[in-house]
Amino acid sequence: MNYWLIKSEPNTYSWDDFVKEKKTLWNGVRNFQARNNLRAMREGDFVFFYHSVHNPSVVGIAKVVKEAYQDPTTEDPNWVVVDLEPYQPLKNAVSLQKIKETPDLQNIALIRQSRLSVMPLKQEEFDLILALAE
DNA sequence: GCCAACGTTGGC
DNA sequence: GCCAACGTTGGC
C-alpha cells in the first residue's frame, strides 16, 4: 500500500467537482517526475486531494481504482492517467500553513518541491496529515 | 497581481 | 551539451 498527494486548482477541478463526477481519470500530467509517480500508483492506494492557489489545503482522500494507462487526451505515449474515485472528505481541511508548522512534515515534496503535482507520502506522513484533520 | 522557483526550449 | 530565454506553477 502506497500513499500519494495530488494537486488540483479548484478553479479548474475541485474536490466538489470530483465528488459530483464520482470517478475521474487524472489527466493532464505533463511532467516526467509526476508521471513516474502516477505509474507507481497501485489499485487501492490512497491519494490526498490538495487544492492549490486558493486557500491551499488538503481537502479529501481519493482511492486509485485503475492503474496507469495511456492518456487518452494525447497521442504522446509518454503520458499516462490513472482512474480515481472519491474515498472520503477530510473532516477539516489541512492547510499548507498547518503542514508547514508541523515539524514532522518538513520533508514532504509539497514543501520541498512546491511545483510537483503528483508526489509520494510515507505512511507516517499520511497518518499525520489525517490526524491534523481531526 | 507579483514574483520566485523551476522545467522546457532552442541557439550555438 | 551548455546555458540563456521563456513559460508555467503556485505561494503570498
Image (tube, coloured by chain):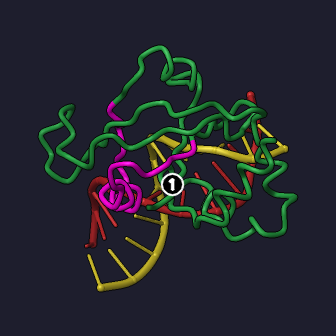
Chain colours: A green, B red, C yellow
- Residue indicated by mark 1: A4
| Quadrant occupied by the C terminus of chain A | top right
> Which residue is painted at 42% across and 32% down in the image?
A85
Q: Is residue A37 magenta?
A: yes
Residue A7 lies in quadrant: top right
Residue C10 placement, left or right of A18: right
Q: Chain letter of disc 1?
A: A
Q: Is residue B12 above or below residue A100?
A: below
> Which residue is painted at 51% across and 34% down in the image?
A87
Q: Is residue A20 above or below residue A39?
A: above
Residue A62 placement, left or right of A10: left
Q: Amino acid at mark 1?
A: Trp
> Which residue is painted at 32% across and 32% down in the image?
A25
Residue A115 placement, left or right of A131: left
Residue A22 lies in quadrant: top left
Q: Which residues are magenta?
A: A25-48
Q: Is residue A46 magenta?
A: yes
Residue A82 lies in quadrant: top left
Residue B1 placement, left or right of A89: right
